[in-house]
Amino acid sequence: MFYDAEISENPSVVLIHGSWLGGWSWREVANQLAAKGYRVLAPTLTGLGERKHLLTGDINLSVHIEDIVNLILFENITNVVLVGHSYGAMVAAGAADRLFGRVSCDIVIVDGFITESGESVVDHYPEVYSLMQHFLSWNPSLVEPPPVETFGLNDTEISAAITPFLTRMPLSTHMEKLNYSLEKQAQMSRSYICCMEFPMFHQTASEAAEQGWRSFEISAGHLAPITHPKQIAELIIASIQS
């Protein structure tokens, strides 16, 4: 999905969604950013959302990184901010590493995974492996969407609105190890937005701050891009401008 603004000096913003979601989960955030003069792209990763017809158990993190790298290169974007929510943080980190030296690239993470180079999500967050095993599909290479309450969403109206759009997630995306250069990443602007009503990523946010990431907080659950789009957009802009 593309949200075009008037031509400006602002970087383009690529919004990368999390597990079981799609580009649709960024819709209101994207509208807010476009209204502030940013060109926004909110792609859906292969096999998810409206691209669920492409779903196979062979889809892994590398495929999703390729989605983002190719999007940026084929759109001829030279200055970009990659915003990764949840699992999308892994995709952002991998894409930024691949694009280094070709594209001016910064990273903003919204309540997302940060692993050491050479680790997978489940290596660094063993509780995620337990969650995914609990929701394995009849096809054990795919994971059914957990109830949205799992992520701190207790608004029944929003829950009812988004649940039909959740799609199965390939387990391999969380099992594949991500290799990236710490030296490259240290040369990028890096910001972390922590959703304070979802404790899972509090330690990650704290460790990121110790490593020199800019830190921001929001009083919201893990699905803040859906439940608090205006505030998330404002924090993304603050991250870009800081």
Image (cartoon, helix red, strand yellow):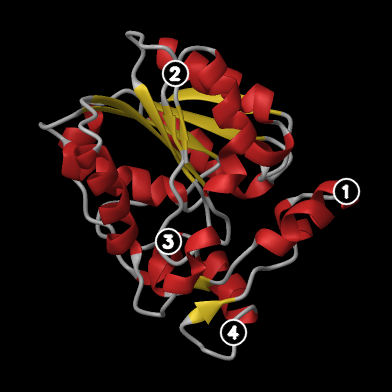
**Alpha-carbon neighbours of circle 1 within 10 Å: few (<14), some, or many (≥20)?**
few
* Position of the C terminus by quadrant: top left
In front: label 3 or label 2: 2
Q: CA distance from mark 4 to mark 2?
A: 39 Å
To which residue does mark 1 refer? 157
In the image, what residue type sits under mark 3?
Answer: Val
Q: Secondary structure at mark 2?
A: loop
Discs 4, 3 touching: Cβ within 8 Å: no
Above or below, 157 against 216 in this view is: below
* Viewer-proximal residue among 170 and 134: 170
In front: label 4 or label 2: 2
To which residue does mark 3 refer? 121
In front: label 3 or label 1: 1
Determine which quarter of the picture holds residue 203: top right
| Earlier residue among tags 4 and 1 | 4
Q: Residue furthest left?
A: 101
Tell me the number on the disc at residue 86.
none
Q: Secondary structure at mark 4?
A: loop
Tell me the number on the disc at residue 137.
4
* Viewer-proximal residue among 38 and 172: 38
| Earlier residue among tags 3 and 2 | 2
Q: Secondary structure at mark 1?
A: helix
Residue 158 image position (x, y, % from top left)? 81, 47
Which residue does the image show at 83% across and 56% down from the upper left?
Answer: 160
To which residue does mark 2 refer? 38
In the image, what residue type sits under mark 1?
Answer: Glu
Q: Secondary structure at mark 3?
A: helix
> Does residue 203 appear to the left or right of 81 in the view shown?
right
In the image, what residue type sits under mark 4?
Answer: Ser
* Viewer-proximal residue among 96 and 9: 9
